[in-house]
Amino acid sequence: MKLSALTILIIGLAVMIVALGVGLRSFLPDMQEAKLQKAYAEQLKTEARKQGDANKRVEKAIATVNQMAREWQSIVAAKTPTADVGTGGINLAVNRWQLVNDAKSFRNNVQRAVNYQVKKGGVMVVQGPLVPFPSDTSTQLVETYFNYPAIRFPVAVFDLGQVTVRGTYDQITENVRAWKYMPKFLAVASGLQIQGTAPKLTGTYNVTMVAYIRGEKISASVPEVAGAPGGGAGGGAGFGVAPA
């Protein structure tokens, strides 16, 4: 049977359609897989961007902490007493009996520093500030004089009372401002009152000082033993260290 040209064309189209159908069935899953892979790649890019932002935030936080540490270290260097009695400071890691004597030396060193500071500005001192002596001469000085562990770190707080100085207005105001810059201590002068007739004036104000104590260890408290000096422990038993 002889096929006409139209019949041959129709048969050819049918074969082509079948072939395309088979090809599409194998091609369409590949297209779907490609779409999934593309979506996954975009997801990875998004997560990578998030991780990059997180890393930047961490780096910024670390830089901020390091900056704060540097600033605090500069404050420690300039506004805290040393950890050595010989240079005017105090070491709380020594045994409690030694600390009883060292605390008296520390107080006297603080008083010398105050006596020098109160003359700033060229004023004449009428009534100078007095650094209080340790009220407790037993082995509980850390708890009473340095307020530890009532406060989370050892610190001595000195209420120096009322100060009276004479001089010009500029001298008196400079004297009051100078307390802010007192080395090794944080000092605050407040409540300034000025009386008299210029240029001879009298200034009265109050001063409070704070001494942050350096060191990583503090000698442990000792049990009280009847008959021991100051009501503290006899001998060296029980001495140790505790974190500051």
Image (cartoon, grey):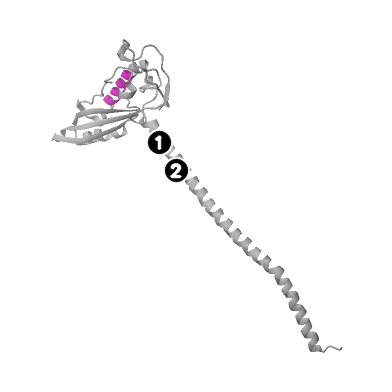
The residue pinned by badge 1 equals 72
Question: From where the camera sits, is residue 124 visible?
Answer: yes
Q: Which residues are magenta?
A: 103-115
Tell me the crowding category of disc 1: few under 14, some 14 to 19, or many 20 or more residues within 10 angstroms, Cα based.
few
Residue 38 in percent (x, y) is at 62, 62
Residue 25 in percent (x, y) is at 70, 70
Q: Please tell me which residue is depicted at 47% across the width and 46% down the height of the picture.
A: 60
Q: Main secondary structure of the magenta part?
A: helix
Looking at numbered disc 2 in the image, what kind of residue is underneath it? Thr
Residue 190 in percent (x, y) is at 23, 35
Between disc 1 and disc 2, whose residue precedes?
2
Question: From where the camera sits, is residue 118 visible?
Answer: no
The residue pinned by badge 2 equals 64
Looking at numbered disc 1 in the image, what kind of residue is underneath it? Trp
User: In front here: 188 or 37?
Assistant: 37
Which label was assigned to residue 218? none
Image quadrant where residue 20 sits? bottom right
In the image, 51: left or right of 132? Answer: right
User: In front here: 45 or 43?
Assistant: 43
Q: Please tell me which residue is depicted at 37% across the width and 16% down the height of the picture.
A: 98
Task: Indicate the secondary structure of the residue bearing disc 2.
Answer: helix
Task: Indicate the secondary structure of the residue bearing disc 1.
Answer: helix
Residue 189 in percent (x, y) is at 25, 34
In the image, 13: left or right of 153? Answer: right
Q: Please tell me which residue is depicted at 65% across the width and 64% down the height of the picture.
A: 34
- Quadrant of image for the N terminus: bottom right
In this rendering, the answer to whether 62 lies above or below 157 is below
